Amino acid sequence: MPEAQTKLETHPFIVDASKMIELMAGFGWRTANAQEIPQMLALGERLVDGQLISPETLTRLHGLTGLTAWVFGDPIEGLVISVPLSPEGLDAVQENRFVAMSPDNAFVAAAGEPCAACYIGIYAGETKAARKAVMSGAGVIRMAVFAQVPCFARAATEDGARSMESLGWKPAGFGADKLWMQGALVAPETKVA
């Protein structure tokens, strides 16, 4: 099993689902229902001109976390896929064992379990309103929900890379091709998990 070059700073915590849902709702986001998952993925694949996770896998992940599949608009104009990672998931990302298209359940921080990192599968919008909501929502959940853990995403497009760079992300230098990251932004005052 490959060893991670450097252990990243992380302060595992239990994600406050109601807080995240409330914050995202403030920007027009809601968690996707089962019927919306194929629609959101079709939009995402069209926007990045590439294949995303399967509807079955996204349904499985969203069922574990309750916070993985997000949509904006009706009809859907924007999407976010965010996967809270367990401590084992953080190690797997660093050791290039994390398969974003089908993450192992052990790598996912299920509802009520410690989250040590977050993997963003996609954040994209088709309309100007959706793109604004994507950037606002992504910034707020990063700062208000996932600030004490590192976050990861792949740069699927040049626009995506520019977007991540504008938010202070950098190429990870390890893991999957085109993997970007942003380290933990804060340390908690008290240990919560």
Image: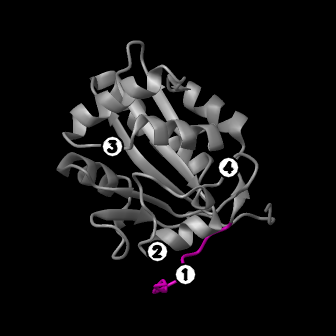
**Element assignment for label 4:** loop
Secondary structure under tag 2 reads: helix
Q: Nearer the viewer, residue 25 or 34?
A: 34
Check disc 4 and report the residue beneath it.
Answer: 110
The mark lying in front, picked from 1 and 4, is 4
Magenta stretch?
1-11
**Residue 125 visible in the snapshot:** no
Q: CA distance from mark 3 to mark 4?
A: 21 Å
Quadrant where the C terminus sits is bottom right
Categorize mark 3 by other alpha carbons within 10 Å: few (<14), some (14-19), many (20+): some
Residue that badge 1 annotates: 7
Query: The residue tagged with tag 3: helix, strand or loop?
Result: loop
Q: Quadrant of residue 177?
A: bottom left
- Which amino acid type is shown beneath numbered disc 4? Ala
Disc 3 to disc 2, how far (Cα)?
Answer: 21 Å
Disc 1 crowd rating (10 Å Cα; few below 14, some 14-19, many 20+) is: few
x, y (%) of residue 55?
Answer: 43, 35
Residue that mark 3 sits on? 52
Alpha carbon of mark 1 to alpha carbon of mark 3: how far? 28 Å
Label 2, on which residue? 94
Mark sitting on residue 59: none
